[in-house]
Amino acid sequence: MTQSPYRFSEPELNGVYRAIAERRDMRHFLDLPVDPQILARLLQAAHQAGSVGLMQPWRFLRISDRELRRQIHELVEAERRATAEALAERHDEFMKLKVEGILDCGELLVVALPDRRERHIFGRRTLPEMDLASAACAIQNLWLAARAEGLGLGWVSLFEPQALATLLHMPAGSRPIAILCLGHVAEFYPKPMLELQNWAAPQPLSAFVYENSWPDAS
């Protein structure tokens, strides 16, 4: 097969695939600061993500106030307990999991969708959720760049969106979608943490790739 003339060099290509393969949803952090220049590079990488209609629907709130960080942690803890109750028979098992590193990480970021997104119609007339998909691309860019920089990142989704929006004085119509814990780690998990904790097992790619039509569920 003919290789593309735009292909990266072998070391560059290996680095891209390594970052993808070794990316982890981190929960354990060291109490060390993140270099401001590295943080700026990571946010720039996020900002370079593709977005539908070039709407760039991501907003990043850096949480530098320790009391505010504590209040965000309380919101997450409340939802953690509510989630455990909803899990019924897996309640105790879930409560043993470490689901965030909000009080430990070097940097805490909240990612949100802005207000007045409805004015962006290009690519969203039939799929309005593409604003969320675009913001998720930005988070993934940040995640992979962080791994390449040797920093861990954990995506926390255990919170009540309106409560967090109120806490952060966000305008009506905006929506927080992620709390990101970013910082130095002692080591990266060899496998996804939930797999190591026997919470779930990843499935092979072959189970998710179809051709021409959806397979017969029967």
Image (spheres, helix red, strand yellow):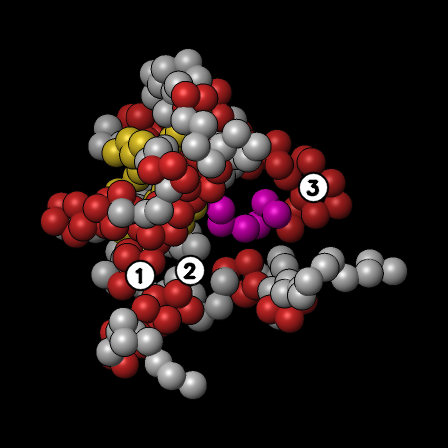
- Residue for point 55% across, 58% down: 194
Mark 1 vs mark 3: give the one in front: 1
Q: Is residue 74 above or below residue 40?
A: above
Magenta span contains residue 12: no
**Cβ–Cβ under 8 Å for marks 3 and 2:** no
Report helix, strand or loop for mark 3.
loop
Task: Check the picture and name the quadrant holding the N terminus.
Answer: bottom left
- Residue for point 27% across, 71% down: 6
Q: Amino acid at mark 2?
A: Arg
Q: Position of residue 47 (x, y in %)?
A: 27, 43
In the image shown, does 101 or 40 lie closer to the viewer? 40
Residue holding disc 3: 87
Q: Position of residue 126 (x, y in %)?
A: 57, 32
Q: Is residue 33 left or right of residue 87?
A: left
**Cβ–Cβ under 8 Å for marks 1 and 2:** yes
Q: Amino acid at mark 3?
A: Leu
Cα separation, mark 1 vs mark 2, equals 8 Å
| Mark 1 / mark 2, whichever is N-terminal | 2
Q: Position of residue 21 (x, y in %)?
A: 42, 69
Tell me if residue 124 can be seen.
yes
Magenta part of the protein: which range? 94-100
Residue holding disc 1: 147
In the image shown, does 200 or 51 lie closer to the viewer? 51
Q: Is residue 16 above or below residue 3?
A: above
